[in-house]
Amino acid sequence: MLFILFLSSVICARISGGKVIGQDTTVINEENATLLCQLTETDDDLTRIIWKKKTRENPEESIFFVIRQGGKTEHKNGLKVQFIGNFAEKNGSIQLLGMRLLDEGIYTCTFNLYPSGPLETDINVTVFARPVVNVSGEAPVAGYLKVKLASCFASNARPGAEVMWRLGDLENFLMTETSDTMNPDGTITVVSYLLGVPLKHLNKKNIQCVVKHITQKEELVLDYTINIHYPPESVVIIPDSPKNAKEFRCIVDSNPEPTSYTWTREGTPYYEGNKLPMPKLSPDFNGLYICNASNKYGSSLGSLYINVHTESSTVCWGLFGFVICCAVLAVVVGVIFRYKQEWIQVLRHSSDERAQDSAGQPRQEDDRDDQDESGNPFSPVQLQTLFIYVDMNQNEFIVLIKLMLYTLIDVAQLKSCSSDIFYI
């Protein structure tokens, strides 16, 4: 009797002395899970290692894997399992392949010892699911009532994800609302709605949807551009080149882009498309052109007036003559002040009669002879045959003025941009 009591106390001590070390683990859906199980602090013989489970799919405990001496394994219930431990070292660790959400549960590792009996531990396995993230945009028409502008989804996550918007400078114009839904497979879908009044100035503004989840080391950021629809509001017509235009473009502020461009000239349909070709501008293209741009919400007009003329520019020729005059005067004045000639012949020889040879004849007689019957001192015919004499006894400034005046007359007749005859 005393021997039996002593033997019982020894077995209890040995059983209480053994220890099974296990560790709870988490795994992401469709990935592999490693279950660690190690027997320590016992010298009993290990006969086999048994793995059991209770999962969401099957709440009743069942054996699914057995490891015998020599590392021989036996699979049950079709679960994909790999033995990654060492039987001789009392390491019963395994790896579960392709975990599903339904495989989440309690897994029990049992060591059968001789003579002490079984030792076991429970391992909790949690299966997470990454969220499927996307932004669904809306295209509201510009108005003054609050509507939904966009939705950010974090779908089929386990556990549910955290979803928020980064609005930047638009925080005072927009607001958000968040809701979540439990799916039949235990995952959660979270949706964050972006709400606001669809004003035109919000169009093409950039914002971000931010999603945080336990399966992600970093937050997931999705960029989104707000889309507000409105009819054409302004039409601007610009040339393709500021100096040599070959076509004119109809630039329209609208969303979406216009689906139709119609050009009219003087009220008559003229061309279709946003570009009006003008291969070579000429007076034939003169007139008022209207560009009518439209989308499904409305239309707007822009106008272009073309006025091409080919008349010679009198100012241009005048400037040309002035430059020539300056060059000629520079030479003439240089000669005058160098040689101090008393008389200078400036224009062409007379076709009617020669100038009088007497240098002492009074100047007043030459002036009277040069007048025509109408009293005009220089008629068009006489101008072609005129000789100009300059008295060097006069003031040098007056001489210079006379030379400039007569030279301008001559250049105007030779290089004038028009056929008119100028009288001085």
Image (cartoon, helix red, strand yellow):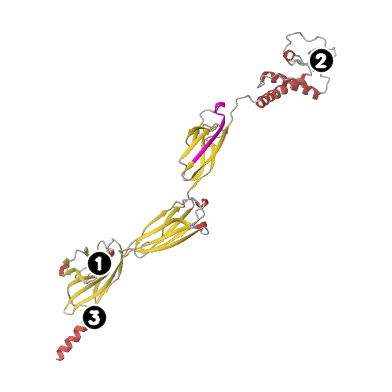
Residue at (52% x, 54% y) in the render? 144
Find residue 281 and report its horizontal and vertical position in percent. Answer: 54, 28
Q: Residues within 10 Å of mark 3 (few under 14, many from 20)?
A: few
Instruction: Look at the image and say whether residue 360 sits in the magenta stretch.
Output: no
SS for callout 3: helix
**Whether label 3 touches label 1, CB < 8 Å:** no
Q: Of the two numbered discs 2 and 3 on the same chain, state the one appearing first in sequence.
A: 3
- Res 154 quadrant in image: bottom left
- In the picture, measured across the screen, residue 58 lies left or right of residue 164, that is left
Q: Residues within 10 Å of mark 2 (few under 14, many from 20)?
A: few
Identify the magenta region. Answer: 281-293
Closest to the observer: 196 or 160? 196
* Vertical placement of residue 338 versus 34, above or below: above
Which kind of residue does numbered mark 3 sit on?
Gly
Q: Which mark is residue 115?
A: none
Which kind of residue does numbered mark 2 sit on?
Asp
Q: Residues within 10 Å of mark 1 (few under 14, many from 20)?
A: few
Residue that numbered label 3 is attached to: 17
- In the picture, measured across the screen, residue 17 lies left or right of residue 382, that is left
Distance CA(mark 2)–CA(mark 1): 129 Å
Query: Quarter holding the N terminus?
Result: bottom left
Residue that numbered label 1 is attached to: 57
Instruction: Look at the image and say whether residue 283 sits in the magenta stretch.
Output: yes
